[in-house]
Image (spheres, rainbow, N blue to C red):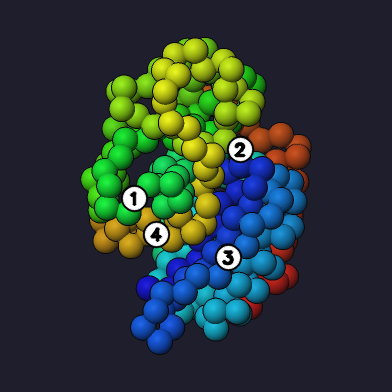
């Protein structure tokens, strides 16, 4: 399977490309600064990774993007870039839940490959709040236990006592997680593009891919009005698409 994936839902930008070479699955990855810089660097770096992999956009099976929840600016940028690339290459878009990607990142790096696991993924939502969702891993596939939501650290509670935590909130909110038992395992994890690539085959088989114009970010907060900075980021992303995409 030939895939491009990227996530800009946090302050870390993650991009990856995968294809099979001589019977072996290979991955080309990049991790760097996200935020406002993502709209300027996402496309050139993605195209460079495709070049390293010996692929063109038209050869991809799908273009995956982290659909959120996460930074409004980051989600809009990733969605706009995925749509633009997919339109030009006539490819489908695969939105991937960023919290599910966090759970997969933790599983891949910290758990035994065939072990079952219960994971609550948590991402910093700023404004003294966290995004959270819970998932079960049965050794081969993930199942959602609770949908993505927004919660204050003081109000956070584990869905079940055997849940493990994964995310990027522990340095900022760890002392305020009063509802988490002291023996709960905590793993630093992010919605990496590599995690998205591992999730993609099952999601594609389940029919989760959509046409570019049907791709949408997942917002949790009600107020999603674009700020001046966000509008600028989207404008820059679209300008980069027009000037740099060569299919």
N-terminal of the two: label 4 or label 2? 2
Q: For this view, does 37 lie left or right of residue 134?
A: right
Whether residue 151 appears in this view of the structure is: yes
User: Mark 4 sits on what residue?
Assistant: 198
Residue 235 makes an appearance in the image: no
Q: CA distance from mark 4 to mark 3?
A: 13 Å
- Which residue is disc 2 drawn over? 71
Mark nearer the N terminus (1 vs 4): 1
Does residue 136 lie above or below 58 as drawn? above
Cβ atoms at labels 4 and 3 below 8 Å apart: no
In the displayed structure image, the side of residue 208 where residue 186 appears, left or right:
right
Residue topped by disc 3: 29
Foreground of the two, 43 or 111: 111
Say which residue label 1 marks: 112
Q: State the residue at coordinates (53%, 33%).
A: 123
Q: Give the residue drawn at x 62%, y 62%.
A: 30
Mark 1 or mark 4: which is in front?
A: 1
| Callout 4 secondary element | helix
**Pointer 4 local density, CA inside 10 Å: few below 14, some 14–19, many at least 20:** some
| Mark toward the viewer: 1 or 2 | 1
Disc 1 from disc 4: Cα separation = 16 Å
């Amino acid at each position: 399977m030939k895939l491009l994936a990227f996530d800009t839902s946090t302050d870390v930008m993650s991009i990856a490309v995968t294809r099979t070479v001589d019977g072996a699955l290979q991955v080309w990855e990049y991790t760097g600064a996200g935020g406002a810089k993502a709209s300027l660097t996402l496309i050139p770096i993605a195209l460079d990774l495709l070049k390293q992999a010996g692929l063109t956009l038209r050869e991809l099976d799908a273009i995956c993007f982290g659909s959120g929840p996460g930074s409004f600016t980051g989600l809009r940028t990733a969605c706009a870039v995925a749509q633009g690339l997919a339109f030009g290459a006539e490819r489908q878009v695969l939105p991937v839940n960023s919290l599910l990607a966090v759970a997969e990142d933790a599983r891949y790096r910290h758990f035994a490959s065939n072990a079952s696991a219960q994971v609550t993924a948590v991402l910093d939502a700023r404004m003294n709040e966290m995004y959270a969702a819970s998932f079960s891993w049965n050794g081969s596939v993930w199942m959602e236990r609770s949908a993505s939501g927004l919660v204050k650290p003081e109000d956070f509670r584990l869905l079940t006592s055997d849940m493990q935590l994964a995310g990027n909130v522990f340095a900022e909110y760890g002392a305020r997680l009063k509802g988490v038992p002291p023996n709960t395992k905590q793993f630093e994890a992010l919605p990496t593009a590599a995690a998205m690539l591992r999730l993609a085959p099952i999601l594609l088989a389940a029919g989760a891919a959509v046409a570019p114009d049907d791709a949408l970010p997942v917002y949790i907060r009600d107020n999603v009005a674009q700020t001046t900075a966000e509008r600028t980021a989207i404008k820059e992303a679209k300008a980069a698409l027009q000037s740099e995409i060569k299919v």
